[in-house]
Image: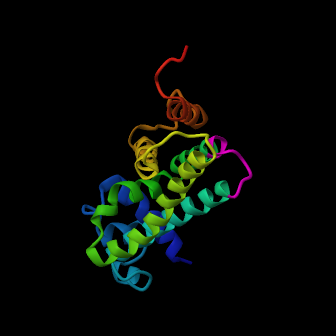
Amino acid sequence: MMNKEMILEAAAQIIRQKGFHATSMQDIAAAVSLQKASLYHHVASKQEILLALLDQALDMLTEHMQLVMHQELPADEKLRLAMDSFLKLLTEHSDLVSVLLLEHRSLDVEFHNRHIVRRDRFEKLWRDLIQEGIDTGKFISYDPALTARALLGVMNWTITWYRPTGSLPVKEITNHMANLFLNGLLARP
């Protein structure tokens, strides 16, 4: 029995491969063995599919980030845990997260405005974590929002170059990024 989850999973895969604009409702219908007309019983439009995928990705990432934020750990350890969780989700759900990171600009204005609320909620968790580190004396940062965006930007870009068959496992990539972010490049005497 076809359901919306199956349609979204197929849509994420196709959109990741072809891009949002090159993907047609016919492509999505064919991937789930439905007639195009039958697809419209499950979803109203390609924009609705895109928004549902973005919501699904952000809800998953937010839920995992909230679990990290509730840990009784120092901010630097929480940051490592948050980065590990994020990169694990990015690699395990690469179709879905790719759509989130690469296709959000394809949303029409009305859908985009609905998306921004979720995106901001997710980004705020990272700002709060940076701020917690500043407040406890673990981190030096003059702009928690810029710091959080820089960190997310570094991790987000991983979606474009990471390969499961590559030489580095996700854990090593996470450790390298966390060390770079927490310690910087400068050698200390």
Snapshot colouring: rainbow
Q: Is residue 52 magenta?
A: no
Side of 17 relative to 134 (left or right): left
Side of 40 relative to 166 (left or right): left
Q: Residue at x 56, y 40 (%)?
A: 139
For residue 101, what is the image quadrant?
bottom left
Image quarter where the C terminus lies is top right
Side of 37 relative to 152 (left or right): left
Q: Is residue 49 above or below residue 14?
A: below
- The percent position of residue 44, horizontal first and vertical second, equals 36, 83
Residue 77 visible in the displayed image: yes
Tell which of 55 and 117 is nearer to you: 117
- The percent position of residue 25, horizontal first and vertical second, equals 32, 72
Residue 32 visible in the displayed image: no
Q: Residue furthest bottom?
A: 41
Q: Is residue 109 above or below residue 81?
A: below
Tell which of 5 and 139 is nearer to you: 139
